[in-house]
Image (cartoon, rainbow, N blue to C red):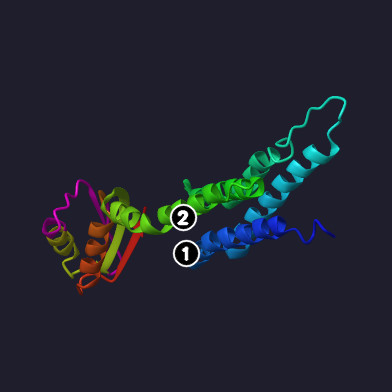
Amino acid sequence: MQEFLSASLWLKLLLAIACGAAIGLERELGDKPAGLRTNMLICVGSTLITMVSLHVALTYSSPQINIADPGRIAAQIVSGVGFLGAGAIIQSRGAVHGLTTAATIWVMAGVGLAIGTGAFGAAIATTLVLLAILVALRRLEVALLTRRHHFIHFQVRGPREGGLVRVINALAFEHGIYLDDVHLSRRGGDMRAEFTLTCSTEKRDDLIEGLLAHDAVDDVHVNE
């Protein structure tokens, strides 16, 4: 009962809840797989396991051998949390999603470890740094991604006599895009044009908007 009423115990658990909630709320607002409750549970669980590891080593070590390893149980957190991270990673169509979520889970387990050992300053500082990485650097990442060039395949359909080719060439020239290979075909009363280019996300969006603004274009399909 005395251990249950320990101020140190509740301080560690409440700090783990606060750190997990701070990161989890950011993840929740970003509609990520590991949200508020997940990050709180990871941080609290890591804190608990670390405290148990210290307790077992200090309480049940043999006086004759006088050897205790307080990190024996806590060390399993590092490998165990890897399973959670692997579950957060999704592979689809050659692209990998969820690496940031998996890394966040790994860091939150480390925060729980720090809290369990009483390293409150390190835990709070790491939580603040993690928030800065996830929030403050997001705009920079988005700006860089919009300027990064992608390999994009366009399929454009329009009326047979609507001047589809002239529209495509004019828009490509306007946006400084070079069309190397354009495949044209006629199906019924439609003209279809297929081409592949390498451009930034910003130019891709401008080209799509420009195509859809013309009466010569009925449909635009983009595949990256």
Q: Residue at x 84, y 24 (%)?
A: 65
Image coordinates for residue 59, horizontal then vertical, percent: 83, 40
Answer above or below: position of 183 versus 190.
Answer: above
Foreground mark, 1 or 2? Answer: 2
Asked if residue 110 is among those painted magenta in the image, a careful observer would answer: no
* Residue annotated with mark 1: 30
Q: Nearer the viewer, residue 70 or 83?
A: 70
Taking 68 as reference, is 196 left or right?
Answer: left
Which mark, residue 40?
none
| Mark 1 Cα shell of 10 Å, populated few (<14), some (14-19), many (≥20) | few
Q: Residue at x 86, y 31 (%)?
A: 62
Image coordinates for residue 104, horizontal then vertical, percent: 53, 51
Asked if residue 180 is among those painted magenta in the image, a careful observer would answer: yes
State if disc 2 and disc 1 touch (CB < 8 Å): no
Q: Say which label, 1 or 2, has the lower sequence index.
A: 1
Magenta-highlighted residues: 172-196
Q: Nearer the viewer, residue 130 or 213?
A: 130
Which mark, residue 128?
2
Q: Residue at x 37, y 57 (%)?
A: 136
Can residue 92 be seen at all in this image of the molecule?
Answer: no
Quarter of the N terminus within the rendering = bottom right
Taking 20 as reference, is 192 left or right?
Answer: left
Which amino acid lies under the numbered mark 2 shown in the image of this protein? Leu
Label 2 element class: helix
